[in-house]
Image (cartoon, grey):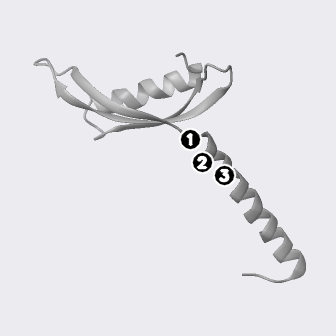
Amino acid sequence: MLSRPEDTLQAGKVLELHFAGETETYELESRMPHKDGNWVLMYDRGRVLSWTADGKPKWMFGTNIDIRDRKLQQESLRKKQAFLNRTGKIEGVGG
């Protein structure tokens, strides 16, 4: 699967930091095309398990999780909170 160019660039940076030993794991949110034609938001996390004698990654493992629903819920919650904040200011109440 090919992701969007900006996500590919960010993934490269995150992996470089991990390969350089600056992070214990790599973690990234990126967009990827789904087989149905839509883009999905993925959370990727993993790490190198073993290294070659010359210091290059030999074995890696990780997971990719579809976080579309979680992001939609977070955005909905953010909008509701903003609405409640505006309503509270207008009515002079708080909670």
Task: Give the mark, 3 or 1, whose residue is nearer the N terminus.
Answer: 1
Of 6 and 45, the residue lying toward us? 45
Tell me the residue that label 1 is attached to.
67
Tell me the number on the disc at residue 73: 3
The reply to whether discs 2 and 1 touch (Cβ–Cβ < 8 Å) is yes
Residue 46 point in image, percent of width and height? 34, 35
Tell me the residue that label 2 is attached to.
70
Of 79 and 14, the residue lying toward us? 79
Residue at point 23%, 22% (across, down): 57
Q: Amino acid at mark 1?
A: Ile
Tell me the number on the disc at residue 2: none
The reply to whether discs 2 and 3 touch (Cβ–Cβ < 8 Å) is yes
Q: Amino acid at mark 3?
A: Gln
Residue 50 point in image, percent of width and height? 17, 27
The residue tagged with tag 2: helix, strand or loop?
Answer: helix
> Where on the picture, by quarter, is residue 53?
top left
The residue tagged with tag 3: helix, strand or loop?
Answer: helix
Describe residue 82's horizontal placement relative to residue 49 as left or right.
right
- Mark 3 crowdedness (10 Å alpha carbons): few <14, some 14-19, many ≥20: few
Describe residue 28's horizontal placement relative to residue 62 as left or right.
right
